[in-house]
Amino acid sequence: MEGRIFVISFLAFLLLSSNNCATSPEVNRSEYDVLCSAVSASSYAVIGEYGDSIPSDFKVDKFMELVEKNIPKDYLKVLKKFVLDIKSKGSYYLLLVSDPDTRSLILFDYSCTPEADGQVLLEPKKFDIKNLGLYDKCSPR
C-alpha cells in the first residue's frame, strides 16, 4: 500500500512539474525554435522596408507595427509573448528578447545576419551578455 501511495504521489508530482515547465518560455523548446524563426523573418521584413537605413528612432512599437503585416501570424503570436527591445545601429539593429517572467535575456539578433545570432537560452555559457558587441558581425571594424 505504501509503495502504491509513493508511486501515485510521484506521478502526481511529475505531472504538476511538467505542466509548469510546458508553460514556461525558458523550457518550451518548440516555442523557442518558432521564436528564432520569427526573429529571422522579422529581420527580413525590416530590411525589406528600410534597407540599410534603419531610423535612429526605430523602437519596438515601429518594429511590431512593421512585422505584424509581414510575417506569419504564428510567428507574430510567439513574438508577442516575450519582452522585446531594439537598439538601432544605423544600417542595422540589435533585437534583444527576454523572458517575460524573469526578464533575463534569452535571444539576441543583429539584423544583418539571416539567423538569430545569440541563442542564449540554448547555450547560456557561450555568450557574454554584458558584452554583446563581441558578437556584432554587422559593425564595420
Image (cartoon, rainbow, N blue to C red):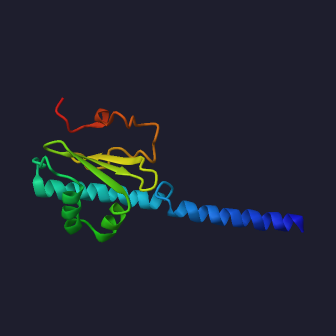
Image: 108 above or below 7: above
Relative to 8, is 116 on the left or the right?
left
Please name the residue shown 60% across and 62% down the image: 18
In the image, farthest residue toward the right: 1
Residue 66, position as x, y percentages in the image: 18, 62
Splitting the image into 4 quarters, where does residue 132 fall? top left
Splitting the image into 4 quarters, where does residue 135 fall? top left
Residue 80, position as x, y percentages in the image: 33, 63
Please name the residue shown 28% across and 34% down the image: 133
Relative to 129, is 114 on the left or the right?
left
Relative to 26, is 133 on the left or the right?
left
**Quarter containing the N terminus:** bottom right
In the image, farthest residue toward the bottom: 73
Residue 79, position as x, y percentages in the image: 33, 61
Please name the residue shown 51% across and 56% down the image: 27
Please name the residue shown 30% across and 65% down the image: 76
Residue 91, position as x, y percentages in the image: 13, 44
Image mark count: 0
Image: 139 above or below 103: above
**Quarter containing the C terminus:** top left
Q: Nearer the viewer, residue 118 or 93?
A: 93
Relative to 135, is 22 on the left or the right?
right
